[in-house]
Amino acid sequence: MSIVVTGASGQLGPLVVESLLERGVDPAEIVATGRAVEKLGALADRGVRTERLDFDDVPDTVPWLGEGDVLLLVSGSEVGKRVPQHQAVVDLAVRSGVRRIAYTSAPAADDTTLAIAPEHAATEQLIRASGLPFTFLRNGWYTENYQQAFEQARETGVVTSSAGDGRVASAPRADFAAAAAAVLATEGHEGAVYELFGDVAWSFDELAAAFAEVLGRDVTYQRLMPDEHRALLVSFGLDEGTAGFVVALDQAIADGLLGLTPGDLSRLTGRPTEPLLETVRSWV
Ligand SMILES: NC(=O)c1ccc[n+]([C@@H]2O[C@H](COP(=O)([O-])OP(=O)(O)OC[C@H]3O[C@@H](n4cnc5c(N)ncnc54)[C@H](OP(=O)(O)O)[C@@H]3O)[C@@H](O)[C@H]2O)c1
């Protein structure tokens, strides 16, 4: 039996593999896949089998996926193309006799106004329709999404957002990866839908305070109205579509969609999620 991970050439996937190894999973039983195989070298050096898998060109069969295997489908990053891409991987899993599949989804994917949710909801639906036993890992926000804001604060002393008093219960990728590894390496997760958030929901005033403490300089939170925020992002060179997307995500935060603390993440990993300040300290 193997544990097969897609997206191992990205940022989350290798942390899942790392977490599996920390749990004592035999590297020979892990298959790390990615489209850019040149990014899989470090995992190959650890004794993990590495294989190319392009979601746009999925073969009928592959020798490294078979009867009884457990598959983690890390959602792809090509927004707008993901539903057929994920369908192709799920179809391969069915043809290969995979025992169960886990998928990295989005908070309340099938019942939310979150702009990123529709492709995740459609993927959850197609996985349910496949008949494969599944686990949905509905990942909330990575703390690393604010690393660019940290760099901006270092230069300007300002954090800008149109999220108002909204809160974000973020956790670093490593915590989400540890939860995925727990689901892959242990039994009893069939049919589970985990809503994964950090243990603490922070406000943007608290984000600015964490940046200030780590940078040793004043950092203030500048509250923007959505239209002001969009115009600012466009002035920084973002296209209208991307700027609108970022503003919509901040609106979701203002609406409380990313500030929930159900505790599933720390329950799966068996440890508290990493506090905001600790993650920010690692960026210096
Ligand atoms: N919760 C959050 O805050 C948050 C934030 C950002 C993204 N996400 C989602 O979580 C996923 C994992 O996050 P991440 O930080 O690891 O993202 P990432 O670093 O952008 O990695 C994306 C991975 O998807 C793979 N991929 C994309 N298109 C592919 C294709 N056509 N065929 C095969 N592989 C493909 C990439 O492979 P190659 O590099 O080999 O092309 C890469 O391994 C993202 O893809 C996205 O769906 C969540």
Image (spheres, rainbow, N blue to C red):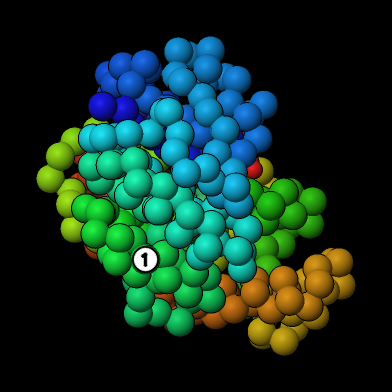
> Is 240 displayed left or right of 168 in the figure?
right
Q: Position of residue 113 (x, y in %)?
A: 45, 82
Quadrant of the rendered image containing residue 167: bottom left
Q: Position of residue 6 (x, y in %)?
A: 47, 40
Q: Is the residue at mark 1 in contact range of ligand 1, meaning its CB lies under 8 Å from it?
A: no
> Is 125 displayed left or right of 153 in the figure?
left
Q: Quadrant of the C terminus?
A: top right
Q: Position of residue 112 (x, y in %)?
A: 40, 79
Seen from the viewer's position, the closer of residues 109 and 253 is 109
Q: Position of residue 283 (x, y in %)?
A: 61, 38
Residue 17 visible in the snapshot = no
Q: Residue at position x 60%, y 47% from top?
A: 57
Q: Which residue is mark 1?
A: 126
Q: Residue at position x 27%, y 19% from top?
A: 24
Q: Looking at the image, which residue sits at the far left? A: 188
Seen from the viewer's position, the closer of residues 188 and 164 is 188
Quadrant of the rendered image containing residue 96: top left
Task: Name the amino acid type tagged 1.
Answer: Leu
Q: Residue at position x 40%, y 71% from top?
A: 121
Residue 9 visible in the snapshot = yes
Q: Quadrant of the N terminus?
A: top left
Q: Residues within 10 Å of mark 1 (few under 14, many from 20)?
A: some
> Is 134 displayed left or right of 27 in the figure?
left
| Residue at disc 1, secondary structure | helix
